[in-house]
Image: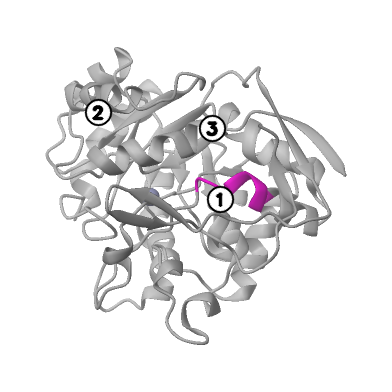
Amino acid sequence: MEKIELIKPDDWHVHFRDNEILKAVVPETTRHFSRAIVMPNLTPPILTGNDAIEYKKRIENEIPKEDEFLPLMTLYLTENTNKDELKKSYENGLVFAAKLYPAGATTNSEAGVKDIQKIMPILETMSDIGMPLLIHGEVTNQEIDIFDREKKFIDTTLHFICTKLPDLKITVEHITTKEASLYVKEGNRNLVASITPHHLALNRNAIFVGGIKPHNYCLPILKREEHRKALLKVATNGNSKFFLGTDTAPHFISDKESACGCAGIFNATYCIPILAQIFDNENALPQLENFISKNGAKHYNLNINKEKITLIKSSQNLIFKKYLDVNEQKIKIFDPDFLVFWEVAE
Ligand SMILES: [Zn+2]
């Protein structure tokens, strides 16, 4: 039996949704994580500081008594966001960051930004006050192939923002390509990226080979093996610009197994054991703590957590629970296509 102790991790990208799903998924995150950045793409989206505070209360109501957990709230940027109100919400501590969704990029992103020029004054304000910008980095033009949308976004939009506002704190979320890993690595000092466990675990074969696998469908979509390898490399080599953002995104099974299935993978439950296995397979366990517990906090100017977690590797592989029950419905829990021997000691 092998045992390692790590600083308790944070998740820098979480979808908690609302109502019954919120109630079911919050404990899955608070069990292993100290803090999380909570995404604002509800229907309707979180547009104001007040929306964020109300949502934060609903989340806090679902945190189990034994867990200490801090949700960090975000605003959903639109072309109509008022920059003075945004500034006030940030400076009063109601929100932690703002999220840029190109219109139509993913679940509930219809109200997102169509023309980046229209929000440049808002981004300038954010740069001035040090407020982090979180980006879903994909173009949404119908004529661009779905596998090229991240690269296209970097070439057109991200590079434009980074050139105009070199000091803006930007997280390119859930990167999926070697181009993104390279752009972030060599880019502005304040430009960083989050990476999900599923993009480290799987390539696009996992969606299409042996029949269509709707539970491996997410956005940005899984890419070729060479891209997965590039992500693995930056995640496991200790570069402080890359950190965990799980993008854990619950949908009911009935909405995933459908003629028009939803994008999103619910991975909160076994995220840490899966990552430990991935890092172990790469002989990179000593870098795991940087990736899950340190690099993100440093970028966001937050203290590193004081609490610790213990990971144990046994000779028996971990048996995954398949589903999370939500009343009469179920959410599929992410299970990668390999055995996991690590688990978190409770
Ligand atoms: Zn997301």
Find disc 2 in the rendering and name its residue.
55
Q: Which mark is residue 31?
A: 3
**Left or right, residue 118 beside residue 32:** left
Q: Secondary structure at mark 2?
A: helix
**Left or right, residue 301 beside residue 39:** right
Q: Which mark is residue 184?
A: 1
| Quadrant for the N terminus in the image | top right
The reply to whether discs 1 and 2 touch (Cβ–Cβ < 8 Å) is no
Q: Tell me the kind of residue under disc 3.
A: Arg
Q: Secondary structure at mark 1?
A: helix
Is 169 one of the magenta-colored residues?
no
**Left or right, residue 44 beside residue 39:** left
Q: Tell me the kind of residue under disc 2.
A: Tyr
Q: Is residue 295 above or below residue 244?
A: above
Residue 127 horizontal/vertical position (percent): 37, 29
**Separation of disc 1 and disc 2 at Cα?**
31 Å
